[in-house]
Image: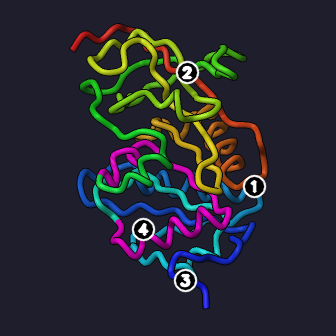
Amino acid sequence: MPGPTACAAPAADRVLVFTRTVQFRHDAIPTTIATLQRVAAAEGMQADATEAADFTPVRLARYRVVVFANTTGDVLDAAQQRALEGFIRAGGGFAGLHAAADTEYDWPWYGARVGAYFRAHPPGLQDTRVQPERDGRARGTAWPIRGEIFTCRDNPRARARGRHGGRTSLRWRWMGDDHPITWCHTFDGGHSWYTGLGHDEAVYRDPDFVAQLRQGLRYAAGSSSRCSVASSTLARALTT
């Protein structure tokens, strides 16, 4: 019989959206779920949402992608963590939205999967422009957005391939003016995609952000090798 971390190959047509919170809870979570369900449907997939931390090899084997959508705190116990690790090692995909980086600080594997841990953010919402990148160079047209912009404990550039990152006027203690906001990489057998955007309800009505979500879901599912890449350039300097 397979061991506790083993999973069958994940199904190609289902997405599990996980929204459990132990610490701060975002009011936008219902909108986040509804948007991800629409995006998944546009890709021919069904998205199931859950707050229950009942991760097992058998249950996860039903899914192609697991999305941690504005999760916070310690949301999985040791057995559930092993189940998610087994899912990824069997080729399952992972996507993280916003506070997914504010989750599972005592689980180094998870931090490596996301690519970085949250450290802090400036007060309020910031007006910013998101600049697509490829191989560290700007590609395409930047698009404006208003959101809560995270800074991370360290810069994910050295670990993640095809970052959404770039230069920003945000000089806020830890990350200087190089401020990745979205990135992707392959890790431990599966595709991983993360965006720091997604804090408030309004952002889910932004067509550029929704397009970014769709591209990220496709990458996590393995249906596209193109990593969604963008940079964050804030419109005003913050000197906190």
Q: Tell whether position 197 is magenta.
A: no
Quadrant placement of the C terminus: top left
Q: Dot 4, how many residues are within 10 Å of its Cα: few (below 14), some (14-19), or many (20+)?
A: many
Is 170 left, or right, of 33 in this rendering? left
> Which residue, given by chain and number where applicable, does mark 4 sit on?
81
- Give the secondary structure at mark 2: strand
Measure how far apart labels 4 and 3 are at the Cα level: 14 Å
Q: Earlier in the sequence, mark 2 or mark 1?
A: 1
| Contact (Cβ within 8 Å) of mark 2 with mark 4 | no
Is 186 left, or right, of 159 in this rendering? right
What amino acid type is highlighted by mark number 2?
Ser
Residue 154 in the image: state x and y as whole percent.
37, 30
Residue at x 69%, y 41% (from the top left corner): 215
Residue at x 47%, y 36% (from the top left corner): 197
> Which residue, given by chain and number where applicable, does mark 1 sit on?
43
| Contact (Cβ within 8 Å) of mark 4 with mark 3 | no
What amino acid type is highlighted by mark number 4?
Gln
What amino acid type is highlighted by mark number 3?
Gly
Q: Which sits in the foreground, 176 or 196? A: 176
Q: Which sits in the foreground, 27 or 223? A: 223
Examine the image and state in which quarter residue 7 appears. bottom right
What amino acid type is highlighted by mark number 1?
Glu
- Give the secondary structure at mark 1: loop
Measure how far apart labels 2 and 1 are at the Cα level: 25 Å
Q: Tell whether position 77 is magenta.
A: yes
What number is the disc on residue 94?
A: none
Judged by depth in the image, the label closer to the viewer, 1 or 3, is 3
Q: Which sits in the foreground, 240 or 5? A: 5
> Which residue, given by chain and number where applicable, does mark 2 sit on?
231
Q: Earlier in the sequence, mark 2 or mark 3?
A: 3
What number is the disc on residue 3?
A: 3
Magenta stretch, residue numbers: 76-105
